[in-house]
Image (spheres, rainbow, N blue to C red):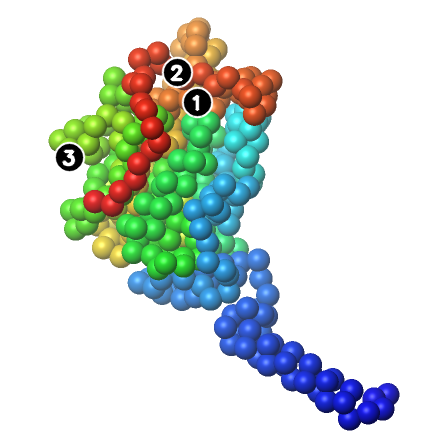
Amino acid sequence: MLRSPRVLFIALTIFGLLAFRIVYNRQHGQLPSAEHPASPNVLLTSKVGSAGSSLLGMGAPPASSADVKNSTLGFERVFVINLPERYDKLDIFTLAASLTGFSHDVIEGIKGATVVNKTLPTLDNIPKKEKSRNNIVGCWRAHLNFAQKIVRERIQTAMVLEDDSDWDVSFKDQLADFATGSRYISNSTSSPRSPYGDDWDLLWLGHCSAQQHPSDQRRFVIENDNTVPPMAHRVNFNTVPKLNELGYDNSTRIVFRANDGVCLYSYALSYRGAQKVLRWQNKVKTFHPIDLGIGHQCRDDPNFKCIAVFPQLVDSHKSAGRFSRDSDIGTYDPTQIREKGYTHNVVRSTRLNIDNLMNGGRDAKIEAQWDDLPQLTGPRRTRFD
């Protein structure tokens, strides 16, 4: 019981301050309320239902490039696509991810034979051969399931990788630079809610072809980068930026708005981007493999904002041993043996350094794939073009 006016005054003052703080926080999205319910998906939730809106959310604190070094690489979730019977691929992927320092959940790969024709948006351009049809359709459906999961669970940003993908041992440092470039290309505010910016649909991190959008010639430039593969070891389709013609040397990487692309070794979708992918694939008139379909969406949909990096950060690994253990959509001679594993376009492959990373810890001796790397001096440099 309060026995003096002084004690009563102090109690009322404290109560008033607490009440003011609660009302203020609710108005600014910092506490649960009817408009801002408590949810793990509060990040980037403002206006995500609008096709042309920003991803900016009021409920999360501003992000920084340092957030890409967390256990989900700066995204809300990370996934890997894996056929249930390919335990071997998931084993090695999990080991590589653990040594890089990120966690992941699994999106089950789909057997194309289980996807009946009536569920496809069109039968135009569907391969006539059953094996080809099943390979393409199964891959298409698995990637749509990734987009569907994002929308169904209201995941605000998510990255996905194929289960045979590989990346440099300095992946997190590369992503920190990429995030700076992504914020620049997406015209993000000075206090974005995602380290990658607040206005993008797709981030294309692992591809075998990507072109720059003709409507946006800006580039974020990373120079003197010792993770850039030498020209002799770059393997892509011809439709990639010609860096030398653009005035950059062979140790330069660029981030840019993408116009098209091929191969989906790894990419990220925002919640808004996943909505758009589902809608686009639902209404296509001509069926294409999912990588080409997404590339066409980057090219043909002016409201679908794709950001890519070249040289790419993620590529497909080919392990030592039987060729038949490679991709499940290929056909291989069961007697063929690969003496040494490799990954195109990745200088210091995580998969090829697994034993070094496990045995050496922080003092691990990391090996590059090639001996003819340029001798660079000084730190990486970045600039906005």
Q: Nearer the viewer, residue 368 or 242?
A: 368
Q: In which image quadrant can residue 293 be found?
A: top left
Q: Amino acid at mark 1?
A: Ser
At horizontal 71% and vertical 87% (from top left) the residue drawn is: 12
Q: Nearer the viewer, residue 129 or 352?
A: 352
Question: Label 3: which residue?
Answer: 246
Q: Amino acid at mark 3?
A: Leu
Q: Nearer the viewer, residue 315 or 31?
A: 31
Q: Considering only order in the chain, which callout, 1 or 2, is on the residue closer to the N terminus?
A: 1
Q: How far apart are the two marked residues, 3 and 1, measured between alpha carbons?
A: 28 Å
Q: Which mark is residue 369?
A: 2
Q: How far apart are the two marked residues, 3 and 2, measured between alpha carbons?
A: 27 Å
Quadrant holding the C terminus = top left
Callout 2–callout 1 Cβ contact below 8 Å: yes
Q: Amino acid at mark 2?
A: Gln
Answer few, some or many: residues within 10 Å of disc 3's Cα (few below 14, many 20 plus, some between 14 and 19).
few
Answer few, some or many: residues within 10 Å of disc 1's Cα (few below 14, many 20 plus, some between 14 and 19).
many
Residue 146 visible to an observer of this rendering: no
Q: Considering only order in the chain, which callout, 1 or 3, is on the residue closer to the N terminus?
A: 3
At horizontal 43% and vertical 22% (from top left) the residue drawn is: 349
Label 2: which secondary element: loop
Answer few, some or many: residues within 10 Å of disc 2's Cα (few below 14, many 20 plus, some between 14 and 19).
many
Q: In which image quadrant can residue 371 be found?
A: top left
Q: Considering only order in the chain, which callout, 2 or 3, is on the residue closer to the N terminus?
A: 3
At horizontal 41% and vertical 41% (from top left) the residue drawn is: 176
- Tell me where residue 189 appears, x and y as whole percent: 35, 59
Question: Label 1: which residue?
Answer: 349
